[in-house]
Amino acid sequence: MSAAAKSPAPGAPPGRGALRRNLPPARRFLAGRKRVLVRLGGWSLLESAQTFLGGYCLAQALDRGFLAGQTGTGLLWLAVAAASILGAGPPMRGVFTQLAELTEPLRDALVRRAVRQALRHAVTDPARTDDRADTGAVSRLTHQTEIVRDSFAGLVLTVRAFVFNAVGALIGLLALAPELLLVVLPPLVLGIGLFLATLLPMASAQRAFLDADEAVAEGVGAVSAGHRDLVACGAQADAAERTGRLIDTAERTSRVLARWAALRTVALGVAGQLPVLLLLVTTPWLLRQGVTTGALAGALTYLLQALLPALHSMMTALGAAGTRLLVVVDRFQDATAAPVPPKAPDPDPDVVLEAGTPRGRRPSRTAPAVEIRAVTHAYGPDSPPVLDHLHLTVRRGEHIAVVGPSGIGKSTLAGVVSGLVAPDHGTVLLGGEPVTGATAQDLADRRVLIPQQAYVFTGSVRDNLLHLRPDATSGELTYAIGVLGAEPLVDRLGGPDAVLDPRGLSHGERQLLALCRAYLSSAPLALLDEATCHLDPAAEARAERAFAERAFTDGARARGGALIVVAHRLSSARRADRVLVLDGTTPRFGTHEELLTSSALYRDLFGHWQHTPPPVGS
């Protein structure tokens, strides 16, 4: 999430600003469910009647029954109180039925909002669709929607219980003796007022805590995703320092939140314990005012069995679930703001577009498939660059392999070429068109990237394979399956229209389906970032040959594309027209035979590959 989305409006406390932002949509949500609220109030009124009868019947049983020597009358009043307790089942069932009518529509609406926002970010900011994607969106879609549903349900349930229990108890106290209200009401109002005064500051503390918690999750996720590159460039200390600062901030915000929780406990003591204490202290005065023993017992019943337990539950819910609900819902409000697309930088003066070709349209047919000009990229201002002033030209129809030690930056190069990683310096051209400033659709039209972790979703086999090109014909689909050797897999799954369960596929089968999907793409450039590492050597060779031929032609029309393979086997490098060797200092680029002479690292890799037994094919 961006800093702008996390920060409250200037000049306003975060809790109060969140309250102002969320009150209008909350009113609209509740206004659309007036019938549900009326039915909920109707069932709750029966609970008020039960509360009233509990204390009133006890008082009458003592004053008119047992203390007056009328045991039968006392037992009759107690029977009425017992009947009201036994009859509480149907009203509670009605309450929970109406509660579900409120909570489930709210959860569904938030899920739809989170999905729309995540898709909008994916379209406007394609550079964040890699492994370091917006994990805050994932949290909103899963964990935070459940927080809202559970918090809202608990809040409605407890506030409703307090309000209607308080109505029944206060009416009962008034019916027993008005003097009782003079003792009970002042500390009750004082405690509730003190508690309400802490709500907005506590909401601000809760928001800061969630911001810090999400920042820790994003920071740790980014370090985990790029740990190989961090080790390769020696940036472990810098990454550890940044992560430590995030953890320290999370610790500070949790301490502030704990202090407000302690103040809330004080308010609970004032409102929950002081009325009982004052009632006991003022008992002699109340008796002199004519308050009966039964009325005093009834008042204690109202306080200890109805009013104070409901008050304790409400304060706990408002202090914890209420502030959490306000903060999390406000994050959904922030998330619904349409992201501002980044402004495209001024064109590189060295980049010459084809005459009459607007930026983002069909690239020049005479330009190289890929051109990298002085590209430098590092994961941190104090880290050595993973790519340092790299120049590379890939001709149309050429098959290139990229090799080097693990963590040297091969996947980073694939990300830079595909437009998913923005270089610190330099220019990347695909077909003569700059990658910088291109929209997600422009990039999808120019290149297709197949990562090592192949993505397959639940749906039909056909839907998976046509995901990048829904308008492909059945003939093209059949050809792609055949040329990549996927017929046995598709047949075993039940054909193109069979429903696919990703959990039942091996890593190699996932990669084979992802390769078929990429083969059908209309993008001329294909990047295979260890996309065949789970295939056996024969299947890998067949896939690379198919994509190399695809780079030349697409049916009857010239494609003019290229193939770049991040290689992990000797055979992949031998099949390529030229090989790029990344060694962290001086990259080497040439044919297999040339590199055996000019690159000591390539000779070492060649010897290692020759003595490494082939992996078991999947």
Image: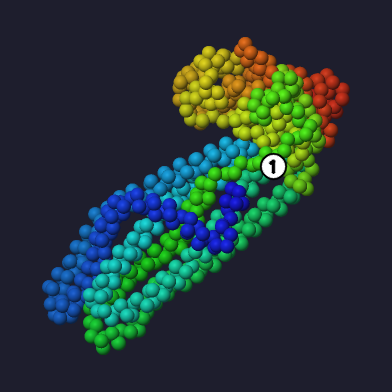
The furthest residue to the right: 597
Q: Is residue 592 left or right of residue 445?
A: right
Picture quadrant of residue 446: top right
Quarter of the picture containing the C terminus is: top right
Q: Is residue 102 left or right of residue 601?
A: left
Judge whether residue 159 can be spotted in this image. Answer: yes
The amino acid beneath tag 1 is His
Q: Is residue 11 left or right of residue 561?
A: left
Give the vertical position of 165 relative to 65 (above or below).
above
Residue at point 22%, 59% (across, down): 87
Q: Which residue is mark 1?
A: 227
Q: Is residue 133 left or right of residue 70?
A: right
Q: Nearer the viewer, residue 22 or 550?
A: 22
Q: Nearer the viewer, residue 384 or 521?
A: 521
Q: Nearer the viewer, residue 475 or 24?
A: 24
Q: Position of residue 147 (x, y in %)?
A: 46, 51
Residue at point 59%, 22% (across, down): 521
Q: Position of residue 555 (x, y in %)?
A: 61, 12
Please tell me how crowded label 1 is: few (under 14), some (14-19), or many (20+) other residues with Cα within 10 Å: some
Residue at point 24%, 79% (across, down): 177
The furthest residue to the top: 556
